[in-house]
Amino acid sequence: MRASILELRRHDWSALRCSCGQSGAHLTESFRRLLDARSAQETIGHTLENHLEVQSMLFEVAPHAVPVILTALGEQLHDSVRGHFLGMLEYLVAGESHRSEIEAGRPVLEEECVAAVHEGISVLYAQAVSGHAEAAFDILEFVDEDDERLEYYRSALATGLGEG
């Protein structure tokens, strides 16, 4: 059993709006394919882009995807999937609610995404230390309110302080 699968099951995806015009129910299969992928080839046709967001315009499924992604980042993933998840997190914390979501009463999806990412901030620092510093720091700039910590990690990794 994987924690990411449990986190995925925790949400009622069929009750959430997806940017493709359907409910988010189909995202469970996309997530499962991404989580199980052992090669970049296995990810073809399975992406979160244009489902959680379109050009950084967020949809109702977005904040619910954040804990799944953060949990997955703590697990073994193919590098292409890890990169995809980190890229999606950046879009989610830097985005804003799509006009249709604002009209539906969800005007602050970006704030919900930032709050959800903030809950797993240690995962992002672990990603930075494990070799994904640039992607992790791009996200951390939006979510970490502790500027001293952010700069400490950035400096430590730049000078090799975290080694050994």
Image: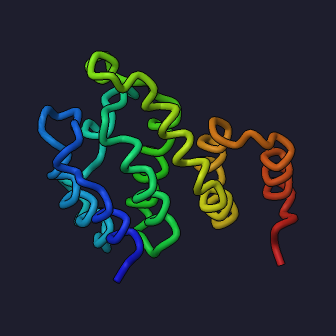
- Which residue ends up furthest to the left in the rendered image? 22
Residue drawn at x 59%, y 53% as measured from the top left: 119
Between 16 and 93, the one lying in front of the other is: 16
Query: Is residue 9 depicted above or below 158 in this figure?
Result: below
Which coloring applies here? Answer: rainbow
**The C terminus is located in which quarter?**
bottom right
Query: Is residue 62 depicted above or below 133 in this figure?
Result: above
- Which residue ends up furthest to the bottom in the rendered image? 1
Residue 32: x, y in percent?
Answer: 25, 66
Residue drawn at x 38%, y 60% as measured from the top left: 81
Between 32 and 101, the one lying in front of the other is: 101
**In this rendering, position of residue 126 left or right of residue 24:** right
Between 40 and 52, the one lying in front of the other is: 52
Query: Residue 72, located in which quarter of the rendered image?
Result: bottom left
Residue 37: x, y in percent?
Answer: 29, 70
Query: Residue 55, located in which quarter of the rendered image?
Result: top left
Image label count = 0
Residue drawn at x 15%, y 42% as measured from the top left: 23
Residue drawn at x 27%, y 22% as measured from the top left: 104
Query: Residue 130, located in which quarter of the rendered image?
Result: bottom right
